[in-house]
Amino acid sequence: RLLVAVSVMIEWGEGDVGIPNVSGGGLSWQLVASARGESSWSDGLFIFSARVGSSDLEMSVTLNDDNNEQVYTWAVLVVQISGDDGESSIYGVASSGTYEIPDGSYSLTLTASPGEGDITLLYLMTDADNAPVEPLLDSGWTLVDDLSVPAGGAGLVCARREGSTSSIVNVLDVYRAGGNLYNAAMVAFIVRAQTAIIATPGMYLWMLANSYYEQLQGVEAGLERPSGMNAGFWGQKFFGV
């Protein structure tokens, strides 16, 4: 199973952020969780899921906004999980909704309790001065990745927890990177497992983005060099190309 997390921030935008489109690979993609902030420089966090086979995968992520406003920054994080328990393996979804999480501690309550052997995943998006976010996780949680988005916008964190049947998902301190946290959003859910193993992210990308960056294309084991305004700079900085 692939889990694709997308965080996006709209430049000077307010209100609902349009849902990104994830497609490709002949897969059936589903939006499994989302949260968003609707104040100035509105942002959104979206988690998509699809089951995969053994063939190579080409994936396309298209950013969208309901009001055709300009995308300022975004991040994409792809995590692969093996051994999940079929199509109905994601459950217990909890979300901060449109509540804009302030600095400090924050908790969500899953709508179900994890079973023995299941994996609980937490995703955190931040609008802040700096990145990586460096959240202080509660005991039992392991950081998967903390993507360093330029200037802190649309920061994206993923963490996992195994061996727990607790429905409480708690972050002791949402943001520790210095400067201001303007708002954050969080989602969490359970992956029901037969013998689930969460792998190191198979591929991930972050960069400064605007309306010139309309697509992110994943190609086999790597990622295609971006094109558009400033692409040469960011491509050289983060891909060495």
Image (tube, helix red, strand yellow):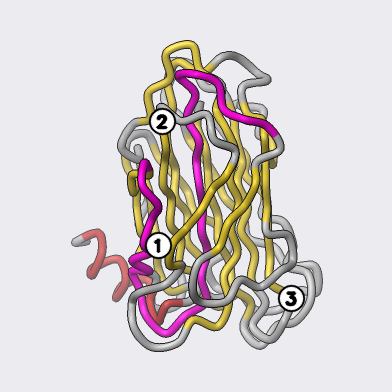
Q: Nearer the viewer, residue 98 or 13?
A: 98
Side of 240 where 36 appears, left or right: right
Q: Which mark is residue 28?
A: none
At horizontal 40% and vertical 82% (from top left) the residue drawn is: 151
239 left or right of 30 in image: left
Residue in the image at 58% along x and 58% along y: 186
Q: In the rendered view, would you say 176 is above or below 79?
A: below
- Mark 2 residue element: strand
Q: Nearer the viewer, residue 214 or 167?
A: 167
Q: What residue type is labelled 1?
A: Trp
Residue named by callout 2: 162
SS assignment at label 1:
strand
Region in magenta: 112-140
Frontmost of labels 3 and 1 is 3
- Judged left or right of residue 162, residue 113 is right
Residue 206, which numbered label? Answer: 1
Q: Position of residue 162 (x, y in %)?
A: 41, 30
**Residue at which label 3 appears:** 38
**Label 3 amino acid?**
Glu
Q: What residue type is labelled 2?
A: Glu
* 73 in relation to 119, above or below: below
